[in-house]
Amino acid sequence: MSEQDRPQKPAPRPAGGGFGGGFGAPVQKAKNFKVSLKRLLRYLSPHKINLIVVVVFAIASTIFTIAAPKVASKAMNKLQDGYMAKMMIQQMSEAQTKAVQQINVQMRQMPTPGVGLSQQVPTDPDALKAVQEFMQLPKLSTVTDPNQKADIVRKIMDLGKKMPGNAQTGEENVKLTPDQINGVIRAIRETNGEYDFHYIGMIVLILFGMYVISAVFSLIMGLVMSGVAQKTVRDMRRQIDLKLNKLPLKYFDKHPHGDILSRVTNDIDTIATTLQQSITQVITSLITIIGYIAMMLTISPVLTLIVIVTLPLYIISTATIAKKSQKYFAAQQKELGQLSGHVEEMYTGHKIVKVFGREKDSIEIFESINDRLNTAGWKAQFISGIMYPLMNFISNLGYVGISIVGGIWIIRNLLGLGDILAFIQYSRSFTMPIAQTANIANIIQSTVACAERVFEILDEEEEIPEKSDAQVIEFSKGRVCFEHVDFRYEEDVPLIEDMNLNVEPGHTVAIVGPTGAGKTTLVNLLMRFYEINAGIIRIDGVDIRDIKRSELRQMFGMVLQDTWLFNGTIKDNIAYGKQGATMDEIVQAAKAAHADHFIRTLPDGYNTVLNEEGTNISQGQKQLLTIARAILADPIILILDEATSSVDTRTEVLIQKAMANLMKDRTNFVIAHRLSTIRDSELILVMNKGRIIEMGNHQDLLAKAGFYADLYYSQFSDQDSEADVG
């Protein structure tokens, strides 16, 4: 509306749709998180089967990914066992051959005269028995059975402890603990001292299959979840669109259009992104955390304890940094909003700034805001940027502990090399799902806040429902009657009180009065954009509340002071007034509005495309197009709200003539501030403070020398003064 009798719009609220790019980013808080979250989840209830599929495939995909390092460790352990067994067999075989040679030499030297028997053969029965058993052992180089090899190696090492020192069995050169000896013997039995490339190849194929299956499951999960997310937000958009069409005009008057647009676009997009990405991330992250812990426990509970000990450090550091960076991110958003507002103001008022020479002031304000934004942004990014280096530092502390303990256990043959490598991989990756979970918590918080803003629209009070027996006036004549009508925007601020008015078909009613008198409000009540508080408004004797809204509004044609044209051709913009209009009808309407001439001077004529702002034609030309649209609509009741205020005087005269023809046999309501344009009206209503204080034609009202006469003569005296100055 162009009048000040409307309630003032509140300042725009911050737009939703963003949830920050990392730790410490500002989180938009929901007023009632639990209730809004439950309501949002209800939108997913029609997709339960698809969600179950998503969960199943998410679990399967994650399990395969989690199990892969453990499977890979088996190949590494098999390589390690093969290497250890091969080296042991090789050393034992060489030692056995050397020891046999030494014993044979000693046995040949036994009869040598002068040499004491005690120096050639062992006198200890146990040692002698050990030598005899050793000599009876098959040579390792000739044995092929792995179990027999393992037994021979074990026997050689056991006999070596009993044999005399000059019989070298190689045992004294192999310094192994009992656990290591048992590990080597096991390795010989399993590998026979050879690299099992067949087994390793099978592991590689299994790993390849696991990764392929995991990728396929992830793809299916993503496709299904994308469908769920898009269908969910499609339903939400549909509900919002239907809701917006049912909301009364007062809702749009009280809420900035940018805020409504933000709720319908940015907030919905945020919900879609969260549903599509964050839900699956929550599932996979939780499963990954549990799976990593389970896998690490199967490898080593003690090493797992080292990893878990670092968790409080992650939590404390994350919470501390997030808390400190939050205020700087909030300051950054605030300064960014001020900067955007300043730039927009300076851009839209660029000419005014130039005319008054305020460029320097504008630049100084910009620099001040920009410096504050720079400071807040630097602090926010720096503090939040500490997070990942700090998490890496904590992770490295755990890595050092794992490496030291793991290295000792490898030496003692308590764990295989592959087990340690798999454990290190689990521990290094353990922080990622934790970080994802923390970030997703922020994302969900912001998403629920966005959903809450959407729900606020859906919960708004709708227009009063139409009656089940609503009427349709087939052949309306355009008789309008106001009977004791009361209306107020605010409960305690009356605007229109006890208004009575009768307008006969074909009459032109001009409505004049100061700003805030209720002129536009009267027209809005007539079209039922607002509901009256008391009284009745009738058209052709029928209460407008008993008429279908769509049928009621089809009776009216409007030309407003604020033009509205959409992004499309001039032809389409004019044809908007009548569905299925022919080109001849469009041209005739344009001629009647005196728009045909300037349209044909454009490069593409009627096919000229108007941009979104309509800046490729003048304001007066835009007004002519809206008048042509109204002419084409051919309504029974015509409403002109300062329709000629944006055109020059010559064009105004032409339009007045066209309007005179258009208004024939129609009921016309003309809202005007320039009283010279309504002198020929059959009835003039003078309004002030919501009341009709004078009524009559132009001559009668001048003769009364009342409020209208004062308005009229004041305008013409101003014009005369300007003419004298000119």
Image: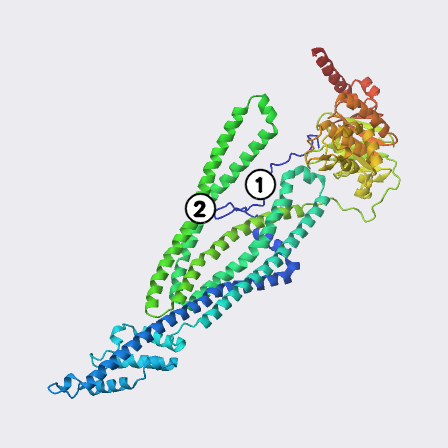
Q: How many marks do you count on the picture?
A: 2
Is residue 373 left or right of 35 when viewed as pictured?
A: left
Residue holding disc 1:
14
State left or right for residue 123 relative to residue 348. left
Q: In terms of secondary structure, where does tag 1 sit?
A: loop
Q: Which quadrant of the rendered structure holds the N terminus? A: top right
Residue 678, placed above or below residue 11: above
Residue shown at the point (57%, 60%) measured from the top left: 218
As drawn, the label of residue 3 is none
Q: Around disc 1, counting alpha carbons within 10 Å, would you say few (fewer than 14), some (14 to 19), or many (20 or more)?
A: few
Which residue is depicted at the point 20% across and 81% down? 164
Q: Position of residue 506 (x, y in %)?
A: 87, 31
Can residue 481 be seen in this snapshot? no
Residue 620 or residue 78, whichever sits in front: 78
Q: Position of residue 410 (x, y in %)?
A: 35, 67
In x, y percent, where is residue 246? Answer: 73, 45
The residue drawn where x is 69% and y is 11% is: 725
Task: Give the label, 1 or 2, closer to the camera.
Answer: 2
The amino acid type found where label 1 is placed reads Pro
Q: CA distance from mark 1 to mark 2?
A: 25 Å
Residue 429 x %, y %:
45, 58
Observer-nearest of 132 and 695: 132
Question: 576 or 1, which lies in front?
Answer: 576
Q: In which quadrant will I find the C terminus?
A: top right
Task: Give the SS element for disc 2.
Answer: helix
Q: Amino acid at mark 2?
A: Gly
Instruction: Identify which residue is drawn at 58% across, 59% down.
Output: 219
To which residue does mark 2 refer?
Answer: 385
